[in-house]
Image: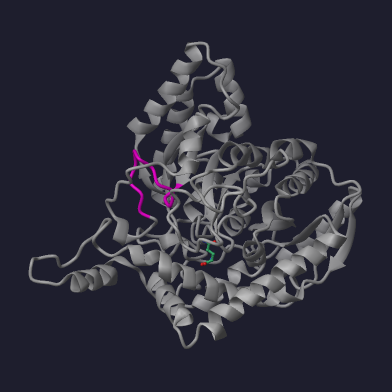
Amino acid sequence: MSLTHKTAAELGALIASGEVSAVEVAQAHLDRIAAVEPQVNAFLHVDAETTLEQARTVDARRAAGERLGPLAGVPIAHKDVFTTADMPTTAGSKILEGWRPPYDATVTRRLREAGLVILGKTNLDEFAMGSSTENSAYGPTRNPWDLSRIPGGSSGGSSAAVAAYEAPLSTGTDTGGSIRQPAAVTGIVGMKPTYGGSSRYGLIAFASSLDTPGPFARNVMDAALLQEAFSGHDPLDSTSIDAPVPSVVEAARQGDVAGLRIGVVKEFGGEGYQPGVLARFHETVELLESLGAKVVEVSCPSFTVALPAYYLIAPSECSSNLARFDAMRYGLRVGDDGTRSAEDVMALTRAAGFGPEVKRRIILGTYALSSGYYDAYYGQAQKVRTLIARDFEAAFGQVDVLVSPTTPTTAFPIGERADDPMAMYLADLCTIPANMAGNAAISVPCGLADEDGLPVGLQIMAPVLGDDRCYRVAAAVENALESRWGGALLSKAPAL
Ligand code: GLN
């Protein structure tokens, strides 16, 4: 099997034992990127020399007798919303074109400390606002399963890179579903850790009370290894949780559900869901039952208003966070010809530098926070948020995990929802509750829809700091389905 088709764990073992060098592994992935990028457009920035330099460092450490960690020398694609001192960082926006951050995000720094080799920066919806990667200022990314379709978003470059075998691992951020939804529609694994379980330091902020970095991989164990490598307490992030967490790698290894109580969220399913998505979801629930889990239906009534509440809270926070892009401090500056005021330069820069979705959200958030409307909109949405957290608490009094389809439909065609924000927002119907309450949630492939042959994801939600439960159930599903299909779901994708 070629190096690009191995798992991250296999590559790490081969490099640690000296059977292959980190440079060979990096070069194989750079070659794959060169071959498929014209079709996929997953990356905004690739720099072969910087990549090979990192790989040479790992090889030198090994040659000097150092014992390497499980992911040392393994290549990774990094979402272009994390700062990187040696690569540009754009957040998919024209307003940050050409910006070179002076520092590494904590996630970036921990990837480097684990010896991961950063291949480049991946495409995303501008400032992580979107579900299709069509809102990138640098053109859309394409789904490797069907190049006329979206790879999900906002972390669509990261999901496509892994699904197209350009990288075994990638990073994402999930504010309302931006890791789980792209994972589901590209047939890979994507995890939103507990809020505060992974650091936001050096992550360009969208909605700070929701933003959560997490891993993408082609299997559950690789995702667990990556999450363990970059998560954990960070004194540089004031909302970082300083508490011991159960090992997610151990949970992924365990992968059994015997005796586990699994709740099916009553509110997610039925009308508005693609039949092929529901068919695979229900089959997977039956599969879990056959593996010894006890399945019950659980009602979470406030989950039905999570989406509208999210579209008040997320834009409100973004309107405040994006005020820093004022033409003075970073990146683009338009109209600074010596005749204009700072205000005029700011207005010209923001008009030229922000795309339509970002402007829509800044306007919506500014309105929701304005003095006359604050209580009616933002205040009300915060109350809904409390109700969602209470629904989760009540549910986890009865069951160990909750399950639902990750997304109502499979990957939709590029352009289909681009002019219809409401249709686009519905892609995150099932994923938003976990962000609103800070819970852990994962998406794991559970089959192909009959109508279009495209991947379907199962979402598994766990309590705050119960990330291990997500991995345990996801690994059980993965093992059972792999024996049924005779291999990973991704191997069913048409070859690029
Ligand atoms: N699609 C959602 C939005 O547009 C979620 C994005 C995200 O999780 N970053 O806000």
Q: Using the rendered image of the protein, determine whether residue 273 is visible from the camera's viewpoint.
A: no
In the rendered image, the vertical position of residue 281 relative to residue 8, given as above or below: below
Magenta part of the protein: which range? 79-90
Residue 260: x %, y % from top left: 87, 50
Residue sitting at 50 percent across and 51 percent down? 200
User: Which of 91/324 is in front?
Assistant: 324
Residue sitting at 36 percent across and 49 percent down? 89
In the rendered image, the vertical position of residue 358 relative to residue 406, given as above or below: below
- The answer to whether residue 460 is left or right of residue 215 is right
User: Which of 427/211 is in front?
Assistant: 211
Q: How is the image coloured?
A: one colour
In the rendered image, the vertical position of residue 352 relative to residue 24, given as above or below: below
Residue 173: x %, y % from top left: 53, 54
Residue 445: x %, y % from top left: 69, 52
- The answer to whether residue 438 is left or right of residue 107 is right
Residue 347 in magenta?
A: no
Residue sitting at 78 percent across and 41 percent down? 479
Q: Quadrant of residue 395?
A: bottom right
The single residue placed furthest to the bottom in the displayed view is 372
Q: Using the rendered image of the protein, determine whether residue 134 is visible from the camera's viewpoint.
A: yes
Q: How many marks?
A: 0
Residue 88 in magenta?
A: yes
In the rendered image, the vertical position of residue 45 relative to residue 271, given as above or below: above
Residue sitting at 49 percent across and 56 percent down? 147
Quadrant for the N terminus in the image: top right
Residue 387: x %, y % from top left: 71, 73
- The answer to whether residue 141 is left or right of residue 233 is left
Please name the predominant secondary structure of the magenta segment in the image. loop
